Image (tube, grey):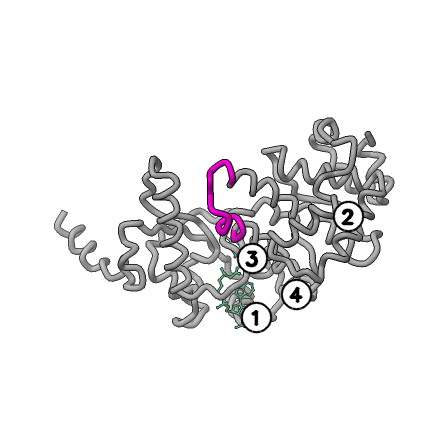
Amino acid sequence: MMTAEDVVKAIVEEDMLEAVTPFWDEAMAGMPDGPLPFLDPAAVIENRQWGGLEESLDASLLATAAYISADKALRCLAWYCYWRVFEAGRDNLATVPALKTLPGDMGSLFYLLIGMAMVPRLREYHRTLRIPEEITRTTAGQISCICGNYRRAHAGRPGVFINQLAWLRHIPAGGGMPLEACRDSLQQAADFFRKRFPERSPAAFCTVSWIFSPQLEQVLPRDSNMVKLQRELYLYPWPSISQSVWFIFFQNVFDPATAPRDTSLQRAVYDYLVDNRYWRNQAMFFLLDDLPEFGRQVYRSRVPAIVDTADKI
Ligand SMILES: CC(C)(COP(=O)(O)OP(=O)(O)OC[C@H]1O[C@@H](n2cnc3c(N)ncnc32)[C@H](O)[C@@H]1OP(=O)(O)O)[C@@H](O)C(=O)NCCC(=O)NCCS
């Protein structure tokens, strides 16, 4: 077993020692003696397919997996990252070595291989819940979504942002979220939970996100997908501890000097924030009982009635 010090020295990133020190010994204690399962060539191809990534990536993914397997320090680091993401169950992995000395795109593919290692774990978990394969495949497709985010920020090169590895159960990236697709998705989720988890009797969808920010209605056209979706939901305030613009600009703190302006959304939010404004998250819920009325702005249309009732109380 190599120590964290040995590894950061070997990859010439000594400044990363602090980042990889937490739980190092615990992670190493569980490291297999033989090949790492997620670097096995057959597993790489299978995970790539389930993850919804294109076949043309196989050659570079396999080359990267072989490169890591042949290098003691990289192998330890790969196991450490895998263990932190999937086994540790606490303290998300936030900072990792950039691996810029690796050839070509191998530095970023290193982390894509870690993300792809979700596939067998997900399949196993879904099997225990007897979830249909189609749903497992759609869920695993989140890997291509997070790779898509990385590509958008890196001129098309494949990889993953490390903070996204902990986001594997969120609203997938990719755009193209018209109201009909939202309705289908909510309906499928409602059917799924009613069928598979009847004992839980879910009552509502609820979440918090930048996509429910009240500011979107100010900066986007009325007919944009996200504004249309917002009008269908019951929105309510939520504390915004950070600007939460990462999903728009791939930066935690908005920096007008470097924030990209490639898409209409980026340009609209940019123009809004550049005047020293602050982006807010907001929360939403939508009651399952209201699903038949999705598309009719059920909560907004009820507002006058609610106000009227409140006046009478
Ligand atoms: C949430 C999401 C699916 C909504 O997409 P949508 O409203 O259907 O977006 P559209 O496909 O209609 O795109 C409209 C425009 O906004 C751009 N856009 C949409 N989401 C974007 C994003 N996250 N970052 C940058 N640009 C984005 C599109 O490129 C398009 O630009 P164009 O007009 O220049 O072609 C999309 O924003 C997305 O993929 N987000 C990333 C994942 C995410 O934010 N998850 C929530 C985590 S809490």
Mark 1 or mark 3: whose residue is earlier in sequence: 3
From the image, state whether disc 4 or disc 3 is nearer to you: 3
| 290 with respect to 222 (left or right) | left
24 versus 196 height, above or below: above
- For badge 2, the amino acid type reads Ala
Secondary structure at badge 1 equals loop
**SS for callout 3:** helix
Which residue type does callout 3 highlight? Phe
Cβ–Cβ under 8 Å for marks 4 and 1: no
Q: Does label 3 point to a residue whose CB lies under 8 Å from ligand 1?
A: yes
Does label 1 point to a residue whose CB lies under 8 Å from ligand 1?
yes
Region of the chain picked out in magenta, as a range? 127-138
Q: Main secondary structure of the magenta part?
A: helix
Give me the disc on residue 65: 2
Q: Nearer the viewer, mark 2 or mark 3?
A: 2
Work out how far the residue at label 4 is from the one at label 1, CA to CA, in angstroms.
16 Å
Disc 2 and disc 1: Cα gap in Å?
A: 34 Å
Separation of marks 2 and 3 at Cα, in angstroms: 29 Å
Could you tell me the amino acid type at mark 1?
Thr
Q: Position of residue 87 (x, y in %)?
A: 63, 34
In the displayed structure, 55 sits above or below 208; it is below
Mark number, residue 247: 3
Task: For label 3, count other residues whose C-alpha is less than 10 Å away and answer few (under 14), some (14-19) or many (20+).
Answer: few
Judge depth for marks 2 and 1 and give the one in front. 2
Q: Which residue is mark 1?
A: 263
| Distance from Cα at disc 1 to Cα at disc 3 | 13 Å
Q: CA distance from mark 2 to mark 4?
A: 37 Å
- Label 2, secondary structure: give it: helix
Nearer-N-terminus badge (2/3) = 2
